C-alpha cells in the first residue's frame, strides 16, 4: 500500500503538523514502507474475532462523587507559556 | 420570507445536559458554577502529561435514571471513546465521549402537538461525555482567554430522532425533556448558564417527499425561544433558497439572537474527522442488572404518569393536569396544597388561574411565590368549610400574594369571618323581610327576581359576612313557608 | 569494596549494619555520575539536592527503625515519570522545561519506601524508539561499547545501571523498552503484567500497552522493587485489583517440575547465531535446574509488528494531542493565529520519529481507514493474545531470545524505521497480550557484547518469572559481568 503526498499533507493537517518539502518526500516513502509491513494482516480472516481494545478484560472502576481539590490555580498556570489575569492566553479564536 | 405550506420542516435536536454531580466526571474538582477562572482545575481535567481519568459513579446512576425515564434500553456493557479534535477549550485534544456503544439507546418521550394530539418523539441515544472549557473573546486585544473550570463537567448528550416537524414541536420537546431531567433532579435545566444546551439539525422537504433534505446544524441557541426562532428562520431560509433555484449546503450555522439571523461558522469550517476509537484509559462500563432495578424502584413519578393520575384519580381536566405537571416544583406545590385539605379541583383551579396568573404578570417562578402550598391549602379549606366566602378568599389571597402571611391571621386581623350560624342569619332575614313588605308581596305574586334584592339587603346588613348558601336557603324557606 | 558495585540486597545489608550511610552511598553515586555521565549521557537531570535530602531522611529511618529494603537505595528514574517540581522532559524539546505539579504513583511509592532518586534518565523521545537515538537530549551510549546504542526506549535507565550510575533504575515498556535495552546492556529487566504497576503520572505513549518496571542487576533486586511498585492505584482505572504476592520469599534455587515452552516462531533462520547458541546453553542450565523444555507454537507471532505499529501509533497520536503550547511545554515564537500556534508548536517541539508515529496513528484512525487498519489490528491482537492462552495450558513459562542480535552501532538504523521496528520483534507480542516478561543476560558475543534471553509468564505470574530468573542467576555468572569503563 502506498500513500500519496496529498494524503500525507491531509493527515498532517489533521494532526496539526507542518511538513516542509524536505520532510515530506522521505515521510511519504517511510509511511508507505510501514504500511507495506501492515499489509500482511489482510491474510488473516478475522470476521468472527472481537476487537481487543484493552490488554486485560476487567470492568471500569467507579469513584464516589466527592469534591477533592488537588491543585491551586498558581500551580496549574505555572507551566503555561502565556497567561493573563488567571486565564491561559491564546491567539484570538474566530468562531 | 414567508411560510410555504408546500414544505415540511424536519428537525432533530441534540441536547447537552450538565449533570448536577458535585465533582467532575473524571476528577475530584468541583462543578460549582461561577468560580474565579481556572480555580476548579487539576492536572487530570487540564490534561497534563501522564494523568488518567477515573469515572464518577453518580454520573452513571444519573444516566441510568435518565435512560429509565425515557424508556430507553440501557446497555449492560458500554464503552467510552475518544473524539479527537484540536480546540483551545479541549485540553486533551480529545473529548472522552461514547461512540459505538452508548449507555442508552432507543428512548422516547411524548409531546402534545398544535392539534392537541399526543405525539411520540424517538430518542436515538443518550451518552456520557465531558464538557469543554470556556473561552473569553470580548474586550481582549488580539487574544482569547481560556478558563478550564467547566472542563470535565459531566454531560449527557441526548439525541432525538428527526421526528419533530415544527419549531413549536421542538419547543415542546425541549420543555418536556427539561422537565423530565428536573423531575429526576439530574440537571438544573438552566439554558442561560449553559447547563441545558441545544443544537438543532434542520432540513426541509416538499410535502409527500420521503427522502430527507440536506440539513444544517444550528448552534448558539441559549433559550427555548431562540431555538424556535432559529428553526423558523432556518426553515424559511432553506425554502427561499430552494424556491429560487438554489441548493442547501450542509454546514454549521451560528444563531445571532440580537440580529435574528444565523451565519455560517468560520472557525470550524474544516471537514471533521474525529478519529473515534475506544478510550484505552477506561475499561468497558459494566452495569449489573440489579443496579438498574434498584434505581428503577427509586425513580420518582414522572410528568406523564402524574398527569394521568391527576386526570383519572383527582378528576382534573387535561389542561390543568398538563399545567400542574409541567415542572416538578409545580406538581409538588399542587400536591402539598391538596395535602393541606384543599379539594384537588379547587386547588388546581386556584393554582392555575389565581396563582400562576399573578406570577406570570410579575414574571416570577412558582418557587418565588409568597403564597406557600401550606397556606393556600389552609385558605381553600376555610372556604370549603364555609368559614369564609369565595369572595373573601380572593381578597385574602391578594393579601397573601402581596405581603405573605397566614390565612387564619389575615381572617382574624381583617375580620373576614363568615357568619354561618343559622339562627343568627334567620334573625337578620326576619328583620329584612319585616323592613321590606313591598318586595315580599311582589315575590309572593310571582316576581321571584326580587330575591336578589332581598339577598343584597341581608348581605348588607351582615357586612357581607353571611354565608350566601345559608342566606339563600333560609330566605327561600321564609318566603315560601 | 566500591559501594557503587553492590547489589541492592548487599547495599541494604551495609546500610542496616551502618557500614555505610545513605549519604555516603548517594555521594558515591553522584560522584560516579559526574565522572561517567558526560561519556554515556544516561541522565537528563541529576537531582543532587533532592538526592542528598532523601539520603539524609533515609539515614534517619535507619536510626528510628522504619527503614525498608529500598531505604537509602540510589535509583535512577526514566524521565517520563512525573516528579513534583523536578523537570520531567520525556526526552522531548516539547517538555524540556516542564515541572509537574504532581507526582507519579511509581515515584511516590519509591519515595515513600525511602529510595533516593538520583535523577531522571535519558530516553527516546516520548519512549518512541529502540536505540535511544531519538532523544532531544542526544543519544545514550552503551557502556559496553560507547559507539553502540544501548537499546531503547529506556536506554538511559539501562546505560545508567550498566555503568553503575545507579543501583537500580525504573523504565517503561510499550513494545520492549525495558527488556530490549536490558538485553543489550547485560541487565535484568522486568515488564510486569499490564496494570500491575500504576500508570498514573507516567507520561503516556500507548495507553493500552505501557507498563512500568524495574531494571536491576539481579532478579532478586527486581523482586524487591516490584514488591514496592505493584498494587492497585485508585488513580488508574486500568490498574489491577489483585493481591500482591511476596516476590522475594517465593524466589527459589531449583526449578523441578517447571515446564518451559520454546516457541518455534522465535527462532527464525535470521536469528543471530551467537544468540541462538547462548539460548541453547541456557536451556541446558535450566534443565540441570530441574525444568523441562517443550516445543510450542505461537502461530500469529509474525503479525505482532504490523499489529503493534497500528495500535501504538494510533493511541500515541491521540495521547500527544495535548501538547499544544497552551497549558505547559514548548510554544512557538509569535504565533500568527491559532492554527499557526498548533502547527508550529507541534512541528518545532516534536522530533522526527514522534512526528512519524503521530502521522501513522492519525492515518490509521482517519475516516475510511479505521476498519482496514485499526479495527483489523485490534482483532489480530486478540488472536495473538489467544496464542499465549493456548500454550499456557501446556507450559508454565516461555523462553525466547529478547532481541534478534546484540547492540548495533549508533546511526545504523536511524533512518530506516522498518529495520528499527523489527528489532522489537520478540518483545512486542508480550505487550499486545498484556503479559509479564523478563529479560536477563545469558551470554556474550565474540565482541563481548551482552546477549539477553526473555522469559514470558501468564498474566500476574511475575513470581514465576522472578523465581526462574533467580534460579538461573544462582547457577550462571552472566549477570555479574560488568563493562569496563
Image: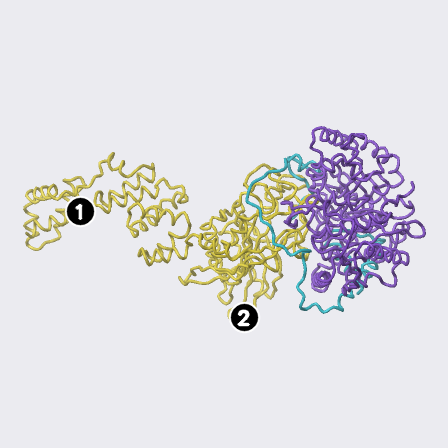
Q: Position of residue B326 (x, y in %)?
A: 41, 52
Point out the residue furthest to the right here.
Answer: C446
Question: How is the model colour-coded?
Answer: by chain
What residue is rendered at 53% in x and 53% in y? Answer: B63
Q: Which chain is cyan?
A: A
Label 2's element? Answer: loop
Q: Quadrant of the N terminus of chain C?
A: top right
C362 or B452: nearer the viewer: C362
Identify the residue under disc 1: B468
C440 or C35: nearer the viewer: C440
Q: Quadrant of residue C107?
A: top right
Q: Position of residue A30 (x, y in %)?
A: 83, 58
Q: Position of residue C441 (x, y in %)?
A: 84, 50
Q: Quadrant of residue B383?
A: top left
Q: Which mark is residue B210?
A: 2
Q: Are marks 2 and 1 on the same chain?
A: yes
Q: Which mark is residue C224?
A: none
Amino acid at each position: 500500500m502506498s500513500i500519496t503526498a496529498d494524503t500525507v499533507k491531509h493527515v498532517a493537517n489533521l494532526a496539526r503538523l507542518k511538513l516542509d518539502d524536505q520532510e515530506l518526500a522521505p515521510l511519504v516513502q517511510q509511511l508507505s514502507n510501514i504500511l507495506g509491513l501492515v499489509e500482511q494482516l489482510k491474510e488473516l480472516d478475522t470476521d468472527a474475532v472481537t476487537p481487543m481494545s484493552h490488554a486485560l478484560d476487567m470492568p471500569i472502576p467507579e469513584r464516589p462523587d466527592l469534591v477533592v481539590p488537588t491543585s491551586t490555580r498558581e500551580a496549574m498556570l505555572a507551566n503555561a507559556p502565556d497567561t493573563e489575569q488567571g486565564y491561559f492566553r491564546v491567539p484570538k479564536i474566530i468562531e | 420570507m414567508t411560510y410555504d405550506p408546500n414544505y415540511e420542516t424536519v428537525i432533530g435536536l441534540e441536547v447537552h445536559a450538565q449533570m448536577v454531580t458535585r465533582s467532575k466526571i473524571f476528577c475530584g474538582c468541583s462543578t460549582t458554577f461561577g468560580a474565579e477562572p481556572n480555580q476548579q482545575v487539576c492536572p487530570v481535567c487540564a490534561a497534563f502529561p501522564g494523568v488518567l481519568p477515573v469515572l464518577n459513579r453518580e454520573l452513571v446512576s444519573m444516566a441510568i435514571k435518565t435512560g429509565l425515564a425515557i424508556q430507553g434500553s440501557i446497555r449492560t456493557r458500554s464503552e467510552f471513546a475518544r473524539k479527537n479534535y484540536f480546540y483551545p477549550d479541549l485540553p486533551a485534544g480529545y473529548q472522552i465521549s461514547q461512540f459505538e456503544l452508548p449507555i442508552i439507546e432507543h428512548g422516547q418521550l411524548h409531546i402534545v402537538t398544535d392539534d392537541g394530539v399526543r405525539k411520540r418523539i424517538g430518542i436515538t441515544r443518550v451518552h456520557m461525555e465531558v464538557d469543554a472549557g470556556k473561552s473569553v473573546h470580548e474586550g481582549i486585544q488580539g487574544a482569547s482567554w481560556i478558563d478550564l473550570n467547566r472542563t470535565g463537567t459531566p454531560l449527557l448528550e441526548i439525541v432525538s430522532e428527526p421526528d419533530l416537524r415544527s419549531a413549536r414541536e421542538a419547543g415542546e420537546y425541549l420543555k418536556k425533556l427539561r422537565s423530565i431531567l428536573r423531575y429526576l433532579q439530574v440537571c438544573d435545566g438552566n439554558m442561560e448558564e449553559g447547563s441545558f444546551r441545544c443544537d438543532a439539525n434542520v432540513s426541509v422537504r416538499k410535502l409527500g417527499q420521503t427522502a430527507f433534505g440536506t440539513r444544517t446544524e444550528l448552534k448558539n441557541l441559549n433559550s427555548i425561544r431562540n431555538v424556535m426562532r432559529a428553526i423558523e428562520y432556518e426553515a424559511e431560509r432553506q425554502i427561499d433558497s430552494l424556491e429560487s433555484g438554489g441548493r442547501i449546503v450542509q454546514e454549521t450555522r451560528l444563531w445571532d439572537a440580537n440580529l435574528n439571523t444565523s451565519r455560517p461558522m468560520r472557525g470550524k469550517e474544516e471537514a471533521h474527522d474525529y478519529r473515534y476509537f475506544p478510550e484505552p484509559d477506561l475499561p468497558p462500563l459494566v452495569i449489573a442488572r440489579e443496579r438498574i432495578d434498584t434505581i428503577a424502584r427509586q425513580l420518582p413519578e414522572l410528568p406523564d404518569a402524574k398527569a394521568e393520575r391527576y386526570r383519572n384519580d383527582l378528576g382534573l381536566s387535561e389542561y390543568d393536569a398538563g399545567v400542574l405537571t409541567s415542572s416538578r416544583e409545580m406538581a409538588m406545590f399542587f400536591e402539598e396544597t391538596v395535602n393541606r385539605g384543599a379539594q384537588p379541583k379547587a386547588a388546581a383551579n386556584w393554582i392555575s388561574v389565581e396563582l400562576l396568573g399573578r406570577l406570570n404578570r410579575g414574571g416570577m417562578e412558582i418557587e418565588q411565590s409568597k403564597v406557600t402550598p401550606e397556606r393556600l391549602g389552609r385558605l381553600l379549606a376555610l372556604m370549603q368549610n364555609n368559614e369564609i366566602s369565595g369572595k373573601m378568599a380572593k381578597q385574602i389571597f391578594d393579601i397573601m400574594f402581596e405581603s405573605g402571611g397566614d390565612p387564619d391571621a389575615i381572617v382574624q386581623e381583617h375580620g373576614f369571618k363568615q357568619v354561618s350560624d343559622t339562627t343568627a342569619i334567620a334573625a337578620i332575614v326576619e328583620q329584612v323581610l319585616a323592613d321590606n313588605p313591598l318586595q315580599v308581596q311582589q315575590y309572593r305574586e310571582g316576581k321571584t327576581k326580587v330575591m336578589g334584592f332581598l339577598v343584597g339587603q341581608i348581605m348588607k346588613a351582615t357586612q357581607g359576612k353571611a354565608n350566601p348558601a345559608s342566606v339563600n336557603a333560609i330566605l327561600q324557606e321564609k318566603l315560601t313557608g | 569494596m566500591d559501594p557503587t558495585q553492590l547489589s541492592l540486597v548487599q547495599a541494604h545489608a551495609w546500610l542496616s549494619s551502618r557500614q555505610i550511610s545513605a549519604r555516603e552511598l548517594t555521594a558515591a553515586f553522584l560522584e560516579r555520575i559526574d565522572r561517567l555521565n558526560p561519556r554515556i549521557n544516561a541522565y537528563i537531570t541529576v537531582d543532587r539536592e533532592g538526592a542528598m535530602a532523601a539520603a539524609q531522611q533515609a539515614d534517619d529511618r535507619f536510626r528510628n527503625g522504619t527503614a525498608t529494603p529500598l531505604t537509602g537505595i540510589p535509583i535512577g528514574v526514566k524521565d517520563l515519570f512525573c516528579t513534583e517540581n523536578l523537570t520531567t522532559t520525556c526526552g522531548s524539546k516539547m517538555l524540556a522545561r516542564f515541572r509537574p505539579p504532581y507526582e507519579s504513583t511509581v515515584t511516590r511509592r519509591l519515595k515513600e519506601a525511602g529510595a533516593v532518586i538520583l535523577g531522571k534518565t535519558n530516553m527516546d523521545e516520548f519512549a518512541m524508539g529502540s536505540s535511544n537515538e531519538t532523544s532531544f537530549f542526544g543519544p545514550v551510549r552503551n557502556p559496553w561499547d560507547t559507539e553502540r546504542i544501548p537499546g531503547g526506549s529506556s536506554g538511559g535507565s539501562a546505560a545508567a545501571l550498566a555503568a553503575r550510575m545507579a543501583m537500580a533504575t525504573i523504565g517503561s515498556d510499550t513494545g520492549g523498552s525495558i527488556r530490549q535495552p536490558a538485553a543489550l546492556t547485560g541487565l535484568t529487566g522486568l515488564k510486569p503484567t499490564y496494570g500491575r504497576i500504576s500508570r498514573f503520572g507516567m507520561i503516556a505513549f500507548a495507553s493500552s500497552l505501557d507498563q512500568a518496571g524495574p531494571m536491576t542487576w539481579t532478579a532478586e533486586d527486581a523482586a524487591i522493587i516490584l514488591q514496592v511498585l505493584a498494587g492497585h492505584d485508585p488513580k488508574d482505572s486500568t490498574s489491577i485489583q489483585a493481591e500482591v504476592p511476596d516476590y522475594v520469599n517465593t524466589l527459589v534455587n531449583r526449578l523441578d517440575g517447571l515446564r518451559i515452552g520454546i516457541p518455534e516462531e522465535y527462532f527464525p533462520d535470521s536469528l543471530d547465531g551467537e544468540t541462538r547458541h547462548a539460548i541453547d546453553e541456557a536451556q541446558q542450565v535450566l534443565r540441570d535446574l530441574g525444568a523441562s523444555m517443550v516445543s510450542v507454537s505461537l502461530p500469529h507471532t509474525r503479525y505482532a509488528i504490523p499489529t503493534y505499529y497500528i495500535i501504538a501509533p494510533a493511541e500515541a497520536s491521540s495521547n500527544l494531542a495535548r501538547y499544544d503550547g497552551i497549558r505547559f511545554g514548548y510554544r512557538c515564537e509569535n504565533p500568527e493565529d491559532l492554527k499557526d500556534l498548533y502547527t508550529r508548536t507541534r512541528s518545532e517541539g516534536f522530533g522526527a520519529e514522534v512526528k512519524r508515529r503521530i502521522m501513522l496513528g492519525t492515518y490509521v484512525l482517519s475516516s475510511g481507514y479505521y476498519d482496514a487498519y485499526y479495527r483489523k489490528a485490534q482483532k489480530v491482537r486478540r488472536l495473538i493474545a489467544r496464542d499465549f492462552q493456548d500454550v499456557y495450558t501446556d507450559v508454565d513459562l516461555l523462553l525466547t531470545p529478547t532481541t534478534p542480535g546484540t547492540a548495533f552501532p549508533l546511526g545504523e538504523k536511524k533512518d530506516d524505521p522498518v529495520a528499527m521496528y523489527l528489532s522489537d520483534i520478540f518483545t512486542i507480542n508480550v505487550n499486545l497480550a498484556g503479559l509479564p516478561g523478563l529479560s536477563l543476560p545469558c551470554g556474550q558475543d565474540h565482541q563481548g557484547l551482552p546477549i539477553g534471553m526473555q522469559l514470558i509468564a501468564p498474566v500476574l505470574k511475575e513470581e514465576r518469572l522472578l523465581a526462574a530468573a533467580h534460579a538461573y542467576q544462582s547457577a550462571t555468572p552472566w549477570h555479574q559481568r560488568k563493562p569496563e569503563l
